[in-house]
Amino acid sequence: MSLRFHEIAESGHRVLNPFTVNKLDLLGQICRIRPGLRHLDLACGKGELLARWAAQHGVEGTGVDISDVFLEAARRRVEELGVADQVRFVKADASAYKDDPQPYDIVSCIGATWIGGGLTGTLDLMRGHLRPDGIAIVGECFWTSPPPTEAYESLGVSEDACVSLARTAERFEAAGFELLEMVLADQDDWDRYVAGQWWTLSDWLRDNPADPDAQQLREFLTRARRSHLEYGRQYLGWGTFVVRPCTPVQPE
């Protein structure tokens, strides 16, 4: 899906993943966040994670995204919560973003591991910004049960893009990270995220029938509805995983 399609489909969403604000708050509680910690959020979307954690926990942060539409919403949100002096947003490609040499206490990438070509590559990117004793927070899909072959094409994912929950943990370990905690989406979270896009897209198509992208968006809406109802609800899970670099084993 193109960036413009994302901006239209998620225009009514505050959180751009199958996750509620209550679970964002829970995630903040379990991450043991203290005031003054520095947080980098790659592909931050509308910045809800940074904004809420700055307001609730006193973090200072930087959000990086390529969408002017999402970044504008993010800046409005930190103003609304009174934390604009704690959080800044930068328009940049998250996969190539370079910041000051001081590493961050927290680096997150929630639901956008495409920036590194998948989970392993994204963890490598995040490690470059992270303190050795810092935490990384990753939002990622997984299969709740083995899907039929036709599900891959319908959902628009390659066969090896997602694995089971247990094998997702193994991927973290293989990349040199220890899994500390997790908060998983449930079926209702998925429905609210995906079905909320259906209504938004339907309204947009009614209001913009002559737009050059209208036919493609109409086709996208039809495919998205069908793939979620046929396969997504039954086979696809999503969660945020809290990890940190493994402690090197000291030689005896």
Image: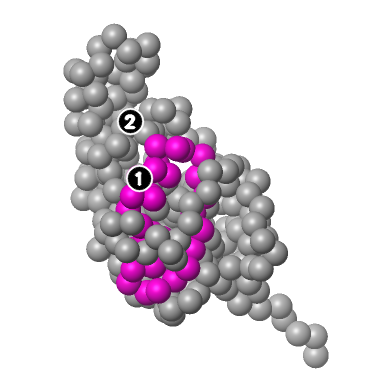
Q: Residue at x 23, y 31 (%)?
A: 200
* Count of numbered circles on the image: 2
Amino acid type, callout 1: Ala
Q: Nearer the viewer, residue 247 or 104?
A: 104
Residue 101 visible in rendering: yes
**SS assignment at label 2:** helix
How dense is the environment of label 1, judged by Cα within 10 Å: few (below 14), some, or many (20 and up)?
some
Q: Which residue is mark 1?
A: 73
Q: Residue at x 33, y 30 (%)?
A: 8
Q: Where is 234 relative to 175, above or below?
A: above
Which image quarter holds the C terminus?
bottom right
Residue 164 visible in rendering: no
Quadrant position of residue 58:
bottom left
**SS assignment at label 1:** helix
Quadrant position of residue 99:
bottom right
Instruction: Find the distance from the CA under tag 2 to the CA under tag 1.
Output: 13 Å
Q: Residue at x 37, y 74 (%)?
A: 57
Image coordinates for residue 215, horizontal then vertical, percent: 33, 12
Amino acid type, callout 2: Ile
Q: Which residues are magenta?
A: 49-78
178 on left or right of 8: right
Q: Nearer the viewer, residue 105 or 81?
A: 81
* Residue farthest top in this picture: 210
* Residue farthest right in this picture: 252
Q: Which residue is mark 2?
A: 8
